[in-house]
Image (tube, helix red, strand yellow):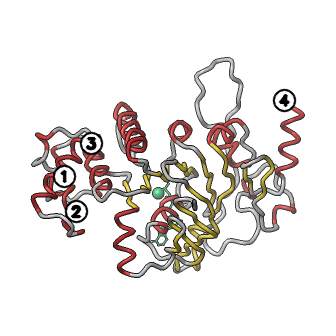
């Protein structure tokens, strides 16, 4: 069986005044049905662009996207309609992604009405079922987004994304705009839905403790490129790339005996516009040498653990010697 989603050497460049902006630059991964790929990396590294390109909300520059083994890189109009059923997105800010003039029921019904397979009464019935699925009380069906709190608004976004029965959802920072107390409720709802409906997620987040909790695999991005990918447990146990190490060192650990030092990144951020070949993390990396000016190749220093860093064997040996 082919994986649900296979992304091969995907590139998305934007033509800007300053030159070609390499927002997503040669990303490859596979995702199986019912699994979660966490995507982490600092602001502007291309996480949203990657998600939106896979969903065809942006045109592909080059590379290939396969869904259930079928090439969907350049879909025809009819194929795109079908893909809108199979692949959906949940946005960071539920407020700005919802139409303020539509009630809860109308918002959830809209994709079903556009799809045109059900009568209006059937769409209404389905919308009410979806409200129940995402834990929105029936009394809110005629409410408007501004009358609800952030958690309930995000539940509307989730219900709308579920309406057409997708197999894959890009969750783009779905809880970062919510109060901490509500974040866990929404995360648990997404996990319950995954278990009952078998949906695969690409989960984009800044929050590393969340990503550890929910992901099977984690991809670390830096300026449009994948610098490291491994299973969640493996990545947290053995971060190899210097950028991943810095990122993980920033997670507060509730243990006074833990002496892990936070790595503060210094040096300038490389521009994503017309980047030079070689490691993009180089100006901020304490291990960088001339060797890092060569293009970096993705290697597999440990089973199913991929790293794009020419120093990775050295870094692994150093770690073994200090452990
Ligand atoms: N439509 C666009 N036109 C030109 N440049 C764009 C466009 N959309 C995104 N970019 C640029 O592409 C790069 C990646 O942006 P993107 O929004 O994907 O990053 P991100 O990782 O999602 O960041 P954040 O964590 O802040 O959401 C950035 O340099 C951004 O300025
Ligand atoms: Mg983003």
Contact, CB < 8 Å: mark 1 with mark 2? yes
Q: How many numbered circles are shown? A: 4
Q: Which residue is under mark 2?
A: 112
Gap in Å between the C-alphas at discs 2 and 3? 16 Å
Q: For this rendering, which residue is in front, 121 or 159?
A: 121
Percent coordinates x, y for residue 88 in the rendering:
38, 60
Task: Judge from the rendering whether residue 82 lies leftward or rightward of residue 159; answer left or right.
Answer: right
Distance from disc 3 to disc 1, alpha carbons, whole Å, reads 10 Å
Dot 1 corresponds to which residue? 127
Residue 80 placement, left or right of 296: left
Which of these two is toward me, 263 or 221?
221
**Quarter containing the N terminus:** bottom right
Q: Earlier in the sequence, mark 2 or mark 4?
A: 2
Query: From the viewer's perspective, is residue 14 above or below residue 27?
Result: below
**Which residue is labeled 4 in the image?**
323
Asked whether mark 1 and ligand 2 are closer than 8 Å, the reply comes as: no
Please report the residue visible at 64 percent of the width from the left and 70 percent of the height from the top: 9
Q: Which residue is mark 3?
A: 133
């Amino acid at each position: 069986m082919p994986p649900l989603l296979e992304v091969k050497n995907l590139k998305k460049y934007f033509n800007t005044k300053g030159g070609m902006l390499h927002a997503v630059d040669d990303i490859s991964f596979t995702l199986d049905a019912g699994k979660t790929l966490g995507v982490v990396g600092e602001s502007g590294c291309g996480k949203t662009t990657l998600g939106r390109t896979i969903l065809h909300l942006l045109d592909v520059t080059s590379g290939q996207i396969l869904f259930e083994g079928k090439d969907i890189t350049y879909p025809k109009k009819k194929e795109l309609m079908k893909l809108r059923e199979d692949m959906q997105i949940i946005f960071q800010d539920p407020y700005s992604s919802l139409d303020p003039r539509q009630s809860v029921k109308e918002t959830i019904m809209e994709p079903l009405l556009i799809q045109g397979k059900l009568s209006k009464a059937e769409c209404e019935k389905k919308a009410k079922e979806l409200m129940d699925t995402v834990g929105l009380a029936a009394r809110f069906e005629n409410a408007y987004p501004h009358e609800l709190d952030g958690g309930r608004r995000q539940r509307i976004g989730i219900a709308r994304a579920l309406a057409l029965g997708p197999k894959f959802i890009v969750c783009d920072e779905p809880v970062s705009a919510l109060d901490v107390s509500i974040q866990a409720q929404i995360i648990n709802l997404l996990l319950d839905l995954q278990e009952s409906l078998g949906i695969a997620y690409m989960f984009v987040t800044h929050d590393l403790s969340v990503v550890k909790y929910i992901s099977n695999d984690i991809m670390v991005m830096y300026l449009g490129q994948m610098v490291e990918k491994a299973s969640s447990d493996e990545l947290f146990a053995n971060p190899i790339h210097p950028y991943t190490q810095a990122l993980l060192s920033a997670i507060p650990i509730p243990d006074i005996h833990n002496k892990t030092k936070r790595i503060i990144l210094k040096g300038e951020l490389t521009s994503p516009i017309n980047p030079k070949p070689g490691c993009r993390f180089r100006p901020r990396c304490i291990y960088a040498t001339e060797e890092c000016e060569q293009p970096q190749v993705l290697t597999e220093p440990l089973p199913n653990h991929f790293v794009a860093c020419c120093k990775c064997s050295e870094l692994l040996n150093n770690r073994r010697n200090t452990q």
